[in-house]
């Protein structure tokens, strides 16, 4: 189950260093935000605990043989569905979404576990059904795997996480090599589903949120408020930023959810364009190191698993930054490794631990 410690020589210390640098930016921003609040640095202390737990799990999962996830993939997925059902009955409503279990002062969002479980089960499905990739029934069957988690998350309702689950499935389909004709058919079906959902599925506030991002000034004190304050914060950072704990939007608490959904805007205000560019550089380096070593992976399940994790990070990073720049609707999605919150951070580090194990095994088995 565990790899021998002698394989430590194949561990990617550079990848770990990049992860720790990105996490450090998170701690600096959260510390800065806590300075403006009378909370005894509560968020900073909690995030530090989440980081210690997450990094420890990253190291543990780096040496757990990833093949165990192939063997028990469907059980992992069923367990995640069980949690998604449970949260609908026993969860707490936070910001209009019944998607959190609350234990004392700690919160756990099971949809984060559902994301990694979906990646694992799709990786197994795609690797076992590789010979059917050119058939349209391959798309349908993989969509059936997606459906339960997507449906349960929409019941919370958590549209942002539902979109991420969908993007995970769609992104893994794209890299699997489906026919262009089938892709076109799928796109037409998706357009039809969106139109039907707009008229018969979306709630009024969800429609308003999607419409307001096109013109935030139409409701500057309501739905458009968050986006307007976010763009002001990003712009006020200019080239070098206003400095840690000196930004007007964050320190005067004009920017809502500054430590979670809008941490990118907080980062831009404090460190400016150069600071944001540095963070994006480390994200790029993060992807480069994984993709470069992915070429050595010979196991189909492992390949799809790593690609799924990459799709997850790309989707979350793109969605969060676009939301902060008023280029996408506000969906309540965290910025991986930067936003405050234990569920997202710990699950992200577990995912990266699994990827780390795959990269180590690729060196051991070559």
Image (spheres, grey):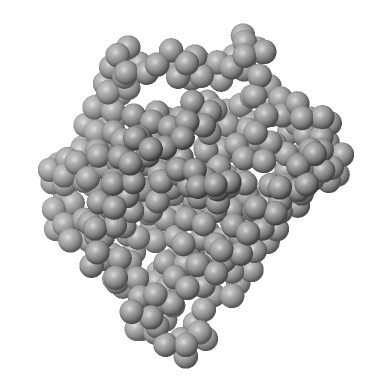
**Where is 200 relative to 175, above or below?**
above
Q: Residue furthest top?
A: 218
- The residue depicted at 29 percent of the width and 33 percent of the height is 151
Residue 161, how many percent across, how many down? 43, 37
**Where is 165 relative to 26, above or below?**
above
- The residue depicted at 42 percent of the width and 66 percent of the height is 354
**Which corner quadrant of the image does residue 223 belong to?**
top right
- The residue depicted at 47 percent of the width and 55 percent of the height is 347
Is 190 positioned to the left or the right of 315 in the image?
left
Q: Residue furthest front?
A: 104
Where the N terminus falls, by quadrant?
bottom left
Whether residue 210 is visible = yes
Where the C terminus falls, by quadrant?
bottom left
Residue 229, how many percent across, how many down? 71, 25
Q: Nearer the viewer, residue 138 or 34?
A: 34
- The residue depicted at 62 percent of the width and 17 percent of the height is 224
Residue 100, how many percent across, how many down? 46, 40
Is 55 positioned to the left or the right of 237 in the image?
left
Residue 22, how many percent across, how many down? 65, 57
Is 115 positioned to the left or the right of 316 in the image?
left
Whether residue 171 is visible = no
């Amino acid at each position: 189950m565990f790899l021998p410690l002698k394989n430590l020589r194949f561990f990617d210390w550079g990848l770990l260093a990049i992860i720790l640098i990105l996490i450090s930016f998170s701690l600096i921003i959260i510390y800065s935000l806590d300075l403006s609040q009378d909370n005894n640095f509560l968020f900073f202390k909690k995030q530090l605990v989440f980081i210690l737990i997450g990094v420890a799990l990253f190291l543990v999962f780096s040496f757990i043989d990833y093949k165990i996830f192939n063997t028990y993939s469907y059980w992992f997925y069923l367990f995640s569905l069980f949690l998604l059902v449970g949260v609908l009955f026993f969860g707490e409503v936070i910001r209009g979404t019944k998607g959190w279990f609350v234990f004392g002062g700690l919160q756990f969002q099971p949809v984060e576990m559902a994301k990694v479980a979906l990646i694992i089960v799709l990786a197994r499905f795609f690797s076992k059904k590789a010979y059917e990739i050119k058939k349209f029934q391959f798309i349908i069957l993989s969509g059936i795997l997606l459906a339960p988690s997507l449906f349960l998350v929409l019941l919370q309702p958590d549209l942002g996480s539902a979109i991420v689950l969908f993007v995970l499935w769609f992104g893994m389909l794209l890299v699997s090599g489906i026919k262009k004709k089938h892709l076109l058919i799928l796109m037409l079906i998706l357009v039809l589903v969106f139109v039907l959902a707009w008229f018969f599925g979306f709630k009024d506030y969800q429609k308003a949120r999607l419409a307001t991002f096109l013109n935030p000034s139409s409701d500057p004190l309501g739905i458009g408020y968050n986006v307007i304050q976010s763009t002001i914060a990003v712009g006020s950072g200019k080239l070098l930023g206003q400095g840690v704990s000196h930004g007007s939007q964050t320190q005067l608490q004009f920017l809502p959810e500054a430590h979670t959904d809008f941490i990118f805007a907080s980062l831009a205000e404090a460190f400016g364009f150069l600071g944001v560019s540095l963070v994006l550089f480390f994200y790029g380096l993060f992807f480069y190191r994984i993709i470069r070593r992915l070429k050595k992976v010979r196991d189909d399940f492992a390949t799809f698993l790593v690609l799924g994790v990459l799709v997850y990070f790309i989707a979350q990073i793109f969605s969060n930054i676009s939301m902060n720049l008023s280029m996408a609707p506000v969906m309540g999605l965290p910025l991986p490794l930067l936003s405050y919150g234990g569920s997202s951070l710990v699950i992200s580090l577990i995912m990266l631990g699994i990827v780390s194990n795959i990269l180590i095994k690729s060196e051991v088995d070559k």
